[in-house]
Each structure stands twice: as structure tokens, then as C-alpha cells.
Image (cartoon, rainbow, N blue to C red):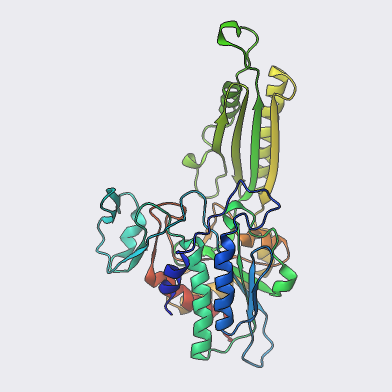
Amino acid sequence: MRTYERLLKYVSFDTTSDENAPENVCPSTEKQKVLARALAEEMKGLGMEDAHMDDSGYVYGTLPANCAEKLPVIGLISHMDTSPSASGANVKPRIVENYDGGDIVLNQEKNIVMSPEKFESLRDYRGKDLIVTDGTTLLGSDDKAGVAEILTAVQRLNDDGVRHGKIAVAFTPDEEIGRGADKFDVAHFGADYAYTVDGGKLGEIEYENFNAAAAIVTVNGVNIHPGDAKNKMKNAMLMGIEFNSMLPPNEIPACTEGYEGFHHLSHMEGDEEKTVLRYIIRDHDRKQFTEKKARFENIARYLNEKYGENTIELTLRDSYYNMKEKIEPHMFIIEKAQKAMKEAGVEPEIVAIRGGTDGARLSFMGLPCPNLSTGGHNFHGRFEYIPVQSMDSMVEVLINIVKAQ
């Protein structure tokens, strides 16, 4: 089975994760287990040992070594869930063959068009075959493309008789809501080191990522009839706006790039009596990350002094940290990926992730785990696409990584 055929099959499963589910519920949506069970059965059919889904929806399996050399156990990991940022239900993918470099009409009825004028990466794929959506849902190549590439690599290892050591494979739920490593069993997985296959443009290798935290600002106001409100009303919405106005206006995603960190207001709701603002905080540098969190604490303290105790309730929770410090002692893992890409005719590019992956947290759990590209673009939205040829190239990269040298 070709890699793209696997992807087209997997995206028919709705596996959207739910960030509002209680943290003790795993996976956050039961529908993720439907794909997980199917993958476990597929892995058994590929000759993988102990392929199974555990009670939390994680899928594990190993491909036994077929050579006598004592080789390290290499792990390959992807996630099954898709982002709640856009619908993952009733995905209708199609393949634009031999893309001509112009506009792609995703949905003629709704006049949804993907243009290289807006999505410049399209210009790199003239003559390639692009898997796109119908413009009403995301595609789900983040990260079902990674799943497809890993299992196609396993199939190829078997079919072509490639010599390799033991390979550990895992597929995780809930990565998109920051919980993908919560219940990952590193000891059971048994890899000496691993790679997540969860990146973007073909050739990317990532071992630096943001330090990340979530902040919830709850503003408690006092609601009085507007006619009698003088010196009595404390409008929670206005105090929430005041909180946000005290954050640096140029430290937001729209004003930052590269290694520049940010705070991002992702959700706001409420009324005069109670308003809740939800933020994410990101920075590659641990010191600046700490300073950004301290700024939230200082603003909350100031507004409580101004408006009264408990007006502002601040909850800060770290999500993950920059894996760089855990990968640098094992740079041979990066060098191995670079060599594998060059052998597959792919130009490797070391980039810093302006986000995070399961691999970041797994690296701090004792499993060095940088991230590799899948080949996809425009994740988490209706204009997501992935070239068929990029997926094929990633299969070759994965084979080159795990084959006996």
C-alpha cells in the first residue's frame, strides 16, 4: 500500500481531541480509540510483535530485528488526534495531480480557493501531486501523515528484506491538546532513542522547541444596575481588557518569529460579573520564559491591589520545555537523521519549532526524541495540504534511519 493510500484511509476517522475534557480522561475523546484499534490490527498484519492499544488509547508494537548485530532499539512515534482548531469530521480529501502552480479550487459551491498568492509554499510544488481538503475541514495530515509514513516504512522493511535492528513504534492520543506524553510508558516502549514524525516541510529536523505554559486569568467583578453603578460596579470584562493591555503589545504571535517568544490570548468570554481569559506563553529561552510568567503574576498582583483581593485569579501551568538541553548530549541522533535525508535525496534543514511535540516531553522523561518532518503544510486549518511525493521521501528517510549500517 502506498503512503498516500494509508493517509486517505486514516483521515476518514474523526479523531479530534477535546481540550475541555477533564485532565484525568485519556484519551480526551473516545473516537480516538476507533483509529487506535484499527492501527493495532494493521500493525499485527505487518508482523509487529505485541501490537496493542492500552486502556488510555496509546498504541504500541515492535518490529523484531532481522540481523545478528547488536543494534540500539530505535523508536518511531506519531500522534493520532487532530487539532480542535478546525473540524476533523467528514473529511473529504482529493488529490490534485501534477499541480500547475495556480489557484486550487477546493470547493466550487462555497467559492473556497487556495492560492499561491496567499500560501506561498505552493510555489515549491509545481508538478507534484497534492492531497487537499474540500475547504470545510482540516485534512489531518498532522499527524496521520506521520502514522502513514511509519507504517509504510515498516511494510517496506518487510517487503524489501532490509536489515534492521529492533524497532519500537508508538502512536499517541491527545498531542494536539498538550497531553500526548501524559501516559506514555517509556519503559514499556523500550527504545534507546526515538524520533517523532510530526513536523512540516520536507527536510525539517527539529530539536529545539518552545518552553510552554498555559495561563488562565479569571476576573471577578461586581455587577450593579447601570443606573446605580457609580463607585460600585466593577466590570470584569473591562478589568480583563485592562489586564491584557498591560502585556507588551509587540510580544504576540503576529509580531514575532524565529526565536522570539510571545504571549497569546487564545480565548475570552464573560460578562460584567465574571470574565475568563486564556493565554499560552512561549519562549525558547528558559530565563525569558520565566520572566514572561512573572509578568503575568505581577500584573495580577497589581490589579488585586487596585481593585481588591481575589479580583484576579491567575492559574499558571507549565506544559513542556525546550528539548535542546536533553538532545545536545546525543547529537549523533541528529547526525543520523541528516545522513538519512541526504541518502534519500532530501536536503536536511535544522529549524527551531515555534511550538512543541510529544518528543519534547519524552526527552525530559528520559527518551531523547527529536522531531522529523512529515512534508505537510498549513496544519490545523481548512487549507492544509501535503504532497504525495514528500510522503514517499519521508518513508525513504525512515528506512535509512533504522536500517543496519
Say if 144 sits above or below 320 in the image.
below
Quadrant for residue 275, please give it: top right
Q: Residue at x 38, y 70 (%)?
A: 388
The x and y percentages for residue 245 are 56, 26
Quarter of the image for the C terminus: give it. Answer: bottom right
The x and y percentages for residue 288 are 65, 43
Quarter of the image for the N terminus: give it. Answer: bottom left
Q: Answer with left or right where residue 52 lies relative to residue 391.
A: right
The x and y percentages for residue 156 are 49, 84
Q: Residue at x 66, y 50 (%)?
A: 319
Please say whether residue 349 is visible from this viewpoint.
Answer: no
Please say whether residue 40 is visible from this viewpoint.
Answer: yes
Q: Answer with left or right where residue 241 lies relative to residue 140.
A: right
Q: Nearer the viewer, residue 18 or 175?
A: 18
The x and y percentages for residue 279 are 59, 39
Say if 296 sits above or below 63 in the image.
above
Q: Nearer the viewer, residue 84 or 31?
A: 31
Quadrant for residue 202, please give it: bottom left
Q: Answer with left or right where residue 261 lies relative to residue 342.
A: right
